[in-house]
Image: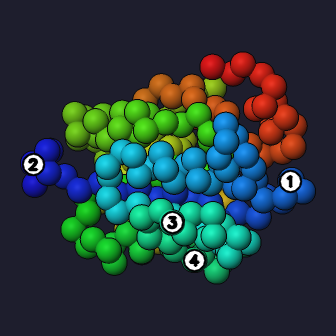
Amino acid sequence: MDAVNKSIGIIVLAAGASSRMHEPKQLLQFEGKTLLRRAVETAIATGCKPVVVVLGANFNRMLAEISDLRVDVCHNTDWRKGLSSSLKCGLENLLNLNPEIDAFIATLADQPFVSEANLLELKNKFLESKKPIVAARYNGIVGVPALFAKRIFKEFAQISGDKGAKTIIEKHRKSLVTLDLPEAAIDIDTNDDYVNLQTEDLF
């Protein structure tokens, strides 16, 4: 399949319980939208299909927040096993929807500054480089959002725990390509993170 017609989906990971906060961080408001809705709408805006949203903890509340959006929802009942379980759930759902998919982008619901343009940069870097993985680089970290080519898919069956995609990224450090993405450095894990998000001029 040529580059123009490559099929690239997106998996939005949003199944966690926000254990370090007093409420589900996916439902926190930022610039008039919840973090969850913002992330899902960003994924939809890229035009990549399918978009699979992985939900787990507080499933019904999360589902209600995005029920009007044209996405496929994967219910990860094993969300307590960590991020790896959500990646497996999302990928299985993605392949059921399109067995011929060429690659997918994994993105998180708690990185509010990751934009449609950023995700499309990952896609374009993949098409140009033909590398099996394109990963964001920020603050000395190489991680998500990241794109994974089909030849990597089978490796997701082997991951476990909360490291998720980072295990695979680390394994392929010599064969992947990175994209500088300072926007991805801002993620919301604690109440302090959320306060800073509201009060600081981060970008």
Q: Residues within 10 Å of mark 3 (few under 14, many from 20)?
A: few
Q: Of tags 3 and 2, which is closer to the observer?
A: 3
Q: Of tags 4 and 2, which is closer to the observer?
A: 4
State the residue position of label 2. 2
Residue placed farthest to the left in the image?
A: 2
x then y, percent, for residue 90:
48, 68
**Where is residue 178, by image quadrant?**
top left
State the residue position of label 3. 68
x then y, percent, for residue 33:
65, 46
Q: Residues within 10 Å of mark 4 (few under 14, many from 20)?
A: many
Taking the image as shown, residue 108 lies to the left or right of residue 103, namely right
Q: Secondary structure at mark 1?
A: loop
Distance between the Cα atoms at labels 3 and 1? 29 Å
Q: Nearer the viewer, residue 111 or 134?
A: 111
Sequence-wise, the earlier of marks 3 and 2 is 2
Q: Residues within 10 Å of mark 2 (few under 14, many from 20)?
A: few
**Where is residue 49, by image quadrant?**
bottom left
The type of residue carrying mark 3 is: Asp
- For the N terminus, the quadrant is bottom left
Q: Which mark is residue 75?
A: 4
The type of residue carrying mark 2 is: Asp
